[in-house]
């Protein structure tokens, strides 16, 4: 009798690409353009951190045109954020007996769910990063604290202008499903929905901005976070050479095993990772610690704002 082995189900080189594509497809923060790759950020050269370069705003005075007087030539200054490189791994396994007694193939089920599993984990990473940076005092002007009052239409309007004259850059708003329900009750969502492509789910909008609903944005002491993003606000670069999936067969324990690895950045522009991870790379709790972050740009250029609010 011929038996199907896990190595018969996948070709690692092909499935790794598929797993990455599925992660992008499933993750609204990535497929909306909030988290975007930056070719200037190279995480394949090694190291636990990577520079995220940017040009500072022009700083010069205009001059009166005068005969025989040369125009002053000014420079544009370059600076950099520093992003932490994150290395994550996960392993799954199933015994021959589990397949026998369940009447189904658990390894096939694991493989089918990997893209969604990684999408959820990347969202947890992003949530931890957002928790960390919005504890930085210098970024306080990007926060609207409504934590002792119920969410209302006025609060949402004020939130849309937390970035001042940069507010037009806001392209998406992320919230818990209970927050979305509150906005529906307030009747302030746009009355149309959008399906940009067959690969992208239908979504609602508020003031023309995409609404992302994710219940990992859970409340702390009944206070819900709402995040407002501009396109490309977060640098998500992945080292595709180190992204891998490997399989093995333990003949002694009659078990198939599968291990996947991802190496990436999840870094908001305009801030700097200044922490020192206890392990090889930061865990989520370290990413959520505000002392590990520092502001390096004008807060408006961070392109992320936060509302903290009660929701009845």
Image (cartoon, rainbow, N blue to C red):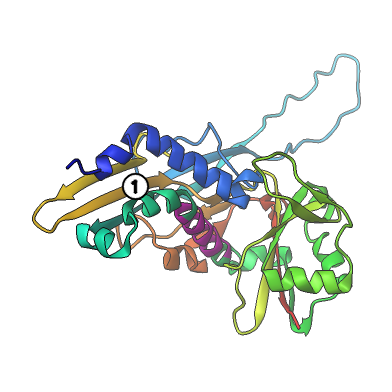
Q: Residues within 10 Å of mark 1 (few under 14, many from 20)?
A: some
Looking at this view, is 67 or 140 the one in front? 140
Residue 125 is inside the magenta segment:
yes
Looking at the rendering, the stretch of residues picked out in magenta corresponds to 117-130
Tell me: residue 11, above or below residue 276.
Answer: above
Given residues 227 and 141, the one toward you in this image is 227
- Quadrant that contains the N terminus: top left
Q: Give the residue drawn at x 82%, y 48%.
A: 168
Q: Position of residue 301 (x, y in %)?
A: 70, 49
Image: 99 above or below 198 = below
Say left or right for 211 vs 86. Answer: right
Q: Residue at x 68, y 40 (%)?
A: 198
Nearest the camera: 18 or 45? 18
Q: Nearer the viewer, residue 109 or 184?
A: 109
Assign the C terminus to one quadrant of the image.
bottom right
Locate residue 248 relative to residue 88 in the image: left or right.
Answer: left
**Which residue extends farthest top?**
68
Task: Report if residue 18 is visible in the image.
Answer: yes
């Amino acid at each position: 009798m011929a038996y199907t082995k896990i190595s018969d189900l996948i070709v690692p080189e092909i499935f790794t690409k598929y797993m990455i594509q599925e992660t992008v497809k499933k993750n609204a923060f990535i497929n909306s353009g909030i988290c975007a790759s930056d070719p200037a950020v190279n995480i394949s050269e090694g190291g636990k951190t990577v520079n995220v370069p940017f040009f500072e705003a022009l700083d010069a005075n205009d001059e009166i045109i005068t005969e025989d007087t040369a125009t002053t030539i000014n420079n544009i200054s370059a600076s950099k954020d520093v992003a932490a490189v994150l290395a994550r791994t996960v392993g799954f396994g199933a015994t021959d007996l589990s397949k026998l007694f369940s009447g189904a193939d658990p390894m096939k089920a694991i493989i089918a769910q990997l893209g969604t599993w990684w999408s959820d984990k990347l969202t947890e990473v992003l949530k931890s990063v957002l928790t960390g940076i919005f504890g930085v005092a210098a970024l306080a002007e990007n926060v609207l604290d409504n934590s002792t009052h119920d969410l209302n239409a006025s609060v949402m309007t004020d939130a849309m202008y937390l970035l001042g004259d940069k507010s037009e850059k806001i392209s998406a708003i992320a919230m818990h499903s209970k927050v979305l329900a509150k906005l529906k009750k307030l009747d302030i969502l746009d009355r149309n929905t959008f399906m940009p492509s067959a690969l992208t789910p239908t979504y609602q909008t508020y003031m023309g901005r995409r609404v992302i609903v994710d219940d990992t944005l859970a409340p702390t002491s009944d206070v819900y976070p709402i995040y407002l993003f501009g396109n490309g606000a977060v640098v998500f670069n992945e080292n595709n050479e180190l992204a891998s999936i490997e399989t093995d067969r333990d003949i002694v324990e009659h078990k198939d095993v599968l291990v996947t690895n991802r190496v990436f950045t999840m870094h908001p522009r305009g801030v700097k990772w200044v922490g020192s991870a206890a392990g090889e790379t930061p865990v989520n709790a370290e990413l959520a610690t505000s002392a590990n972050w520092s502001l390096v740009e004008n807060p408006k250029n961070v392109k992320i704002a936060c509302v903290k609010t009660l929701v009845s």
